[in-house]
C-alpha cells in the first residue's frame, strides 16, 4: 500500500483517530489500512508515540498508552463535572428524558465532534428564530434564553434574531450572525432555499448548527432537537377515533401549511382515520396555528355541514381555542361541543374544562429550546452529540374523555393553570411560577434583563 502524503503530525493524528474509532486497540495491519500509511511509516510513528507513552506496542498490536489514558481520565473528570451541572440545570428546567419509544424505528446516530472545538473558550452563540406570531414561539424563545442564562459560565455572548416569518430576513439574520463571529447557531427555520443556503454556508465556515422545532431537509446540521410530530398526530387521532366509537364526521384543523411539523402531524392523523371506514372527513383547513384561523375555519364548516360535526382534530390548542369559541358563538351549550384535540395553550384546557368539552391533547414542549442550547454547547466542546434528539411529551385528557385503549399521563384538570394567563404554554419547563407576560431574564449580551420575545397582548 502506498503512503498517504501526510506530515508526521497528521500521520500521528490519523493513527490516534484510528485507535479511537476501534475502541483503543488495533493490529498493525489494520492500523496501516485505516490510516493509509506504509508499514515502515506506521512503525516509525508508533515507535515515536510509544516512547512518549501515548501508545503502547505489543505483539503486532497498537494500544492506547498510559499518557493517553491520563488525558482520557482528565477529560472524564471534566465530563463528570459537566454531567453534574447538566443534571442540576435539567432538574431546574423540569425537562424529561428522551421519548425513545416513539422513535424506535430510527437508530440513534451521532455527529462527529469538530476538530476546531475550543472547550476553554467562552462561546458566542446566536439564535435565528422563524417568528413570534403565536404564544408557542414566544415560549420557545423564553426557553432558549433560560438556557443561555443557565450556561452563562461558558457563554460570552448570546444574540437572538427574529425573522418575522420572512425567509429572506432569516437568511440575512444567519449571515449577519456568522459575520459577527458566532461559534454556534440555534436555528428554528423557515423552509426555503435561501435559509438552507445560509445554514449550509455557516456549516462550511465551521459554525456548529443545531436546528430546533423545524429542520431543513436539504441541510445537514450538527443536531436536530424536536418532539415526535408523528406521535402527536397519531395518538391524538387514535384517541379521537376511540372516543367517537370509530364513526362520525371530522373537521381537521392543522397548523401552518408550509411547516414540516404540521405536515407530519396531519399525515399521521390521516393514516389513523383511514383505518375507520365510518369516519368521514368533512374538511381539512390550514389555520397557521392562529386562534382566528381556527375560529374562521370552524365557523365555515358549521355553516357548510349544518352543524353536523362529530369531532375536531387540531394539531395544537393554538387554533383549537378558536374552534371551541366558534361552537360557542354558534349556540352550542356547555356539554354539547364535540370532542377536540390540541394542547399547548392554557386557554385550550380552560375552555375544555369550563364547557365540558372532551379533550385529548399532547403538548409540543418549548423545552426543546433549552435542550438545543445544551446540545450545541456540547458539540462546540468537542463531544459527540445525537443527530436527532426527541423530547418526551405526555398524553393529557379531560376526565370526561377517558378511553379503554389509551392511558393518559396527566389529567387536564390537574394540568391547567387557572392562576396564570390564557396564553401560557404549559410545556415550557420554565418552572411553576413562569408567566409569559412578566418574564424577565439575564444572560450574556442582554444588558436590560428583557426577553427578546414579549407578548403584545392576549392570545394571538
Image (spheres, rainbow, N blue to C red):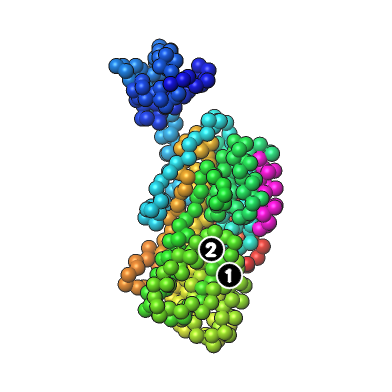
Near-viewer residue (307 or 277): 277
- Tell whether 353 sits left or right of 190: left
Residue 251 can be seen, yes or no:
yes
- Tell whether 123 sits left or right of 386: right
In the displayed structure, 453 sits above or below 31; it is below
The crowd level at tag 1 (other Cα within 10 Å; few <14, some 14-19, many 20+) is many
Taking the magenta stretch, the answer to whether it contains residue 175 is yes
Residue under label 2, please give it: 262
Q: Main secondary structure of the magenta part?
A: helix
Specify the segment rendered in magenta.
164-178
Residue under label 1, please give it: 286
Tell me the SS state at disc 2: helix
Residue 69 can be seen, yes or no:
no
Write the residue at 39% across / 72% down.
Answer: 275
In the displayed structure, 432 sits above or below 249; it is above
Chain-order first, disc 2 or disc 1? 2
Mark 2 and mark 1 residues within 8 Å of each other at the beta carbon: yes
Near-viewer residue (138 or 340): 340
In the displayed structure, 211 sits above or below 131; it is above
- Residue placed farthest to the left in the image? 59
Write the residue at 41% across / 51% down.
Answer: 106
In the displayed structure, 152 sits above or below 369; it is above
Taking the magenta stretch, the answer to whether it contains residue 46 is no
Amino acid at each position: 500500500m502506498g503512503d498517504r502524503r501526510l506530515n508526521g503530525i497528521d500521520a500521528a493524528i490519523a493513527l490516534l483517530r484510528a485507535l479511537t474509532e476501534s475502541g483503543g486497540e488495533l493490529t498493525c495491519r489494520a492500523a496501516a489500512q485505516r490510516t493509509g500509511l506504509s508499514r515502515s511509516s506506521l512503525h516509525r510513528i508508533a515507535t515515536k508515540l510509544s516512547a512518549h507513552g501515548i501508545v503502547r506496542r505489543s505483539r503486532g498490536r497498537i494500544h492506547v498508552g498510559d499518557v493517553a489514558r491520563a488525558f482520557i481520565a482528565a477529560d472524564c473528570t471534566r465530563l463528570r463535572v459537566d454531567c453534574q451541572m447538566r443534571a442540576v440545570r435539567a432538574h431546574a428546567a423540569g425537562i424529561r428524558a428522551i421519548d425513545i419509544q416513539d422513535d424506535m424505528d430510527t437508530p440513534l446516530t451521532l455527529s462527529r465532534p469538530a476538530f476546531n472545538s475550543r472547550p476553554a473558550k467562552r462561546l458566542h452563540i446566536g439564535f435565528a428564530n422563524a417568528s413570534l406570531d403565536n404564544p408557542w414561539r414566544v415560549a420557545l424563545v423564553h426557553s432558549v434564553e433560560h438556557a443561555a442564562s443557565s450556561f452563562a459560565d461558558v457563554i460570552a455572548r448570546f444574540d437572538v434574531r427574529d425573522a418575522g416569518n420572512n425567509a429572506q430576513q432569516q437568511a440575512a439574520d444567519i449571515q449577519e450572525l456568522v459575520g459577527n463571529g458566532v461559534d454556534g447557531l440555534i436555528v428554528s427555520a423557515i423552509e426555503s432555499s435561501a435559509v438552507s443556503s445560509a445554514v449550509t454556508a455557516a456549516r462550511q465556515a465551521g459554525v456548529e448548527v443545531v436546528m430546533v422545532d423545524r429542520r431543513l431537509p436539504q441541510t445537514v446540521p450538527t443536531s436536530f432537537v424536536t418532539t415526535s410530530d408523528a406521535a402527536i398526530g397519531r395518538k391524538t387521532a387514535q384517541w379521537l377515533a376511540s372516543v367517537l366509537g370509530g364513526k362520525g364526521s371530522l373537521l381537521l384543523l392543522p397548523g401552518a401549511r408550509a411547516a414540516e411539523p404540521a405536515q407530519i402531524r396531519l399525515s399521521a392523523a390521516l393514516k389513523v382515520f383511514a383505518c375507520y371506514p365510518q369516519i368521514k372527513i368533512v374538511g381539512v383547513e390550514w389555520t397557521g396555528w392562529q386562534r382566528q384561523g381556527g375560529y374562521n375555519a370552524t365557523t365555515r364548516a358549521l355553516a357548510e355541514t349544518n352543524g353536523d360535526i362529530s369531532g375536531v382534530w387540531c394539531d395544537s390548542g393554538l387554533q383549537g381555542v378558536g374552534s371551541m369559541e366558534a361552537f360557542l358563538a354558534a349556540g352550542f351549550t356547555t356539554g354539547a361541543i364535540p370532542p377536540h384535540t390540541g394542547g399547548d395553550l392554557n386557554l385550550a384546557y380552560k375552555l375544555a374544562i369550563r364547557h365540558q368539552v372532551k379533550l385529548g391533547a399532547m403538548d409540543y414542549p418549548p423545552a426543546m429550546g433549552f435542550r438545543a442550547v445544551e446540545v450545541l454547547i456540547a458539540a462546540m466542546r468537542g463531544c459527540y452529540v445525537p443527530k436527532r434528539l426527541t423530547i418526551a411529551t405526555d398524553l393529557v385528557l379531560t376526565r370526561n374523555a377517558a378511553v379503554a385503549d389509551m392511558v393518559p399521563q396527566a389529567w387536564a384538570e390537574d394540568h391547567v393553570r387557572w392562576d396564570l394567563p390564557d396564553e401560557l404554554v404549559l410545556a415550557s419547563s420554565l418552572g411553576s411560577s413562569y408567566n409569559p407576560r412578566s418574564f424577565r431574564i439575564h444572560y450574556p449580551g442582554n444588558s436590560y434583563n428583557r426577553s427578546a420575545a414579549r407578548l403584545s397582548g392576549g392570545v394571538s
